[in-house]
Image: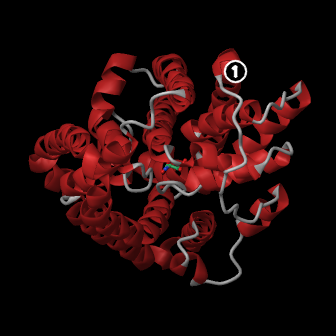
């Protein structure tokens, strides 16, 4: 029944919302280019409306992840089934992220010759405290029931939802009311998110205009090359890896997949938030044939831990920063980058700019100066738009694939 509510409400608005986002995107680019001379104005007076929109998205994201994972788990009513889907998801996410960072390093190494060696004396970047791999692991587990929600700590929220979801299943008949309650809460927060999303064309316009106005000229030159390297990787990963996986394992043509994903792709590109794109992503994947129970489990998980675009960005930027400082990375250091970028992308929150903070961890792991982040910080938003788009496309491909595998198992 809740599928009907979700689909029904969106049915009438869907096309127009996607069209509105697209129009907002085009208008923002035009307005940004026109207002390059008054970029401060765009930052002071236009960006805050985008920030309001993002704040609303951040506000809703904790409950959305909590209830949608719980409702995905309880609707399966079978721990073994959750285990199988969880297993498929974990293996797929891990493998695609490793391939992504490998592509990132390979392409960045090809570009290395054209990256400049800079005088870096004037760099200023307040590095956040570096987080070790073990810290990331320990921090996944909550020590308090409320803090994960109040701090919007997504990994902890996921652990909470899985634990509670499993407990509800194990209680069986006795927890029937809890199942209904979780389903209703999920519908309420989805509805709330839908209301917030109605503002997305305005949000998109107000977020993108200052980016174009401020960066229009800055992307020319050396930064254009590192941006180009990252975007080539995003493109290769989407077109080669996801096309291959959705057609072989998901049973749908890449053309149908990417076309069906267009509204979510446009939204991710302009909002730079995987988590904010979650409801649209759910809608798109369900239209592509993913089941609701699978997508409400796989997508919130993916929006938090599966970041192929972020991994690519971290690999490309590590090579770029090393080359700006005249440092040649060894093969062993590259392997370390593959490992830490995979871990860092898991620990990255699905909100704008989070990947740049985690870049500090990758740089520290191979002894590169964290200050180097200042080199790419100015255009981070442009990296972020592409990496978020790839992040959510990867999540969607997993939902389509896991649904197809589960369908085939049931048919047997
Ligand atoms: N903005 C990205 C996302 O939401 C995370 C990142 O900064 O890499 O997926």
In the rendered image, the vertical position of residue 286 relative to residue 187, given as above or below: above
State the image coordinates of residue 212 (x, y, percent, origin top left). 32, 42
State the image coordinates of residue 63 (x, y, percent, origin top left). 43, 71
Q: Residue at the spot x=79%, y=67% of the render?
A: 138
The answer to whether residue 107 is seen in the rendering is no
As drawn, is 373 to the left or to the right of 40?
Answer: right
- Near mark 1 (Cα within 10 A), the count class, few <14, some 14-19 or many ≥20, is many
Query: Residue 117 falls in which quadrant of the image?
Result: top right
In the rendered image, the vertical position of residue 111 relative to residue 363, given as above or below: above
In depth, the one of 341 and 43 nearer the eye is: 43
> Does the beta carbon at disc 1 come under 8 Å from ligand 1?
no
Q: Residue at the spot x=43%, y=47% of the render?
A: 295
State the image coordinates of residue 5 (x, y, percent, origin top left). 20, 59
As drawn, is 302 to the left or to the right of 338?
Answer: left
> According to the image, label 1 marks what residue?
112
State the image coordinates of residue 3 (x, y, percent, origin top left). 27, 54
Helix, strand or loop at label 1? It is: helix
């Amino acid at each position: 029944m809740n599928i009907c509510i979700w689909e029904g409400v969106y049915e009438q608005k869907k096309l127009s919302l996607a069209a509105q986002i697209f129009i907002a995107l085009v208008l923002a680019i035009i307005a940004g280019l026109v207002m390059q001379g008054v970029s401060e104005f765009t930052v002071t007076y236009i960006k805050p409306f985008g920030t309001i929109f993002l704040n609303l998205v951040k506000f809703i994201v904790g409950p959305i992840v909590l209830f949608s994972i719980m409702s995905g788990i309880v609707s399966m009513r079978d721990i073994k089934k959750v285990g199988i889907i969880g297993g498929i998801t974990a293996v797929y996410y891990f493998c695609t992220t490793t391939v992504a960072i490998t592509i990132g390093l390979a392409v960045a190494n090809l570009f290395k010759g054209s990256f400049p060696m800079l005088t870096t004396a004037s760099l200023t970047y307040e590095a956040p405290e570096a987080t070790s791999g073990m810290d990331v692991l320990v921090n996944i587990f909550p020590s308090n029931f409320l803090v994960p929600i109040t701090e919007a700590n997504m990994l902890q929220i996921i652990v909470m939802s899985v634990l509670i979801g499993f407990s509800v299943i194990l209680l069986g008949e006795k927890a029937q009311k809890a199942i209904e309650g979780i389903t209703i809460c999920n519908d309420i927060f989805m509805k709330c998110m839908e209301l917030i999303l109605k503002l997305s064309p305005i949000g998109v316009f107000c977020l993108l205009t200052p980016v174009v106005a401020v960066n229009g000229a800055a992307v020319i030159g050396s930064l254009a090359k590192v941006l180009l390297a990252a975007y080539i990787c995003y493109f290769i990963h989407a077109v080669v890896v996801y096309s291959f996986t959705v057609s072989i394992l998901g049973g749908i043509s890449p053309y149908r997949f990417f076309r069906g994903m267009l509204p979510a792709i446009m939204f991710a590109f302009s909002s730079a938030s995987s988590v904010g794109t979650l409801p649209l992503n759910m809608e798109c994947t369900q239209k592509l044939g993913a089941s609701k129970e699978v997508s409400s489990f796989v997508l919130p998980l993916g929006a938090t831990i599966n970041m192929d675009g972020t991994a690519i960005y971290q690999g490309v930027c590590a090579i770029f920063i090393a080359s700006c400082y005249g440092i040649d990375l060894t093969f062993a250091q590259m392997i370390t980058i593959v490992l830490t970028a995979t871990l860092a992308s898991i620990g990255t929150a699905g909100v704008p700019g989070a990947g740049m903070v985690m870049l500090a961890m990758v740089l520290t792991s191979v002894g590169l100066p964290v200050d180097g982040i200042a080199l790419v910080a100015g255009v981070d938003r442009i990296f972020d738009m592409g990496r978020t788009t790839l992040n959510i496309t990867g999540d969607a491909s997993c939902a389509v694939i896991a649904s197809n595998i589960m369908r085939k198992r049931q048919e047997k």
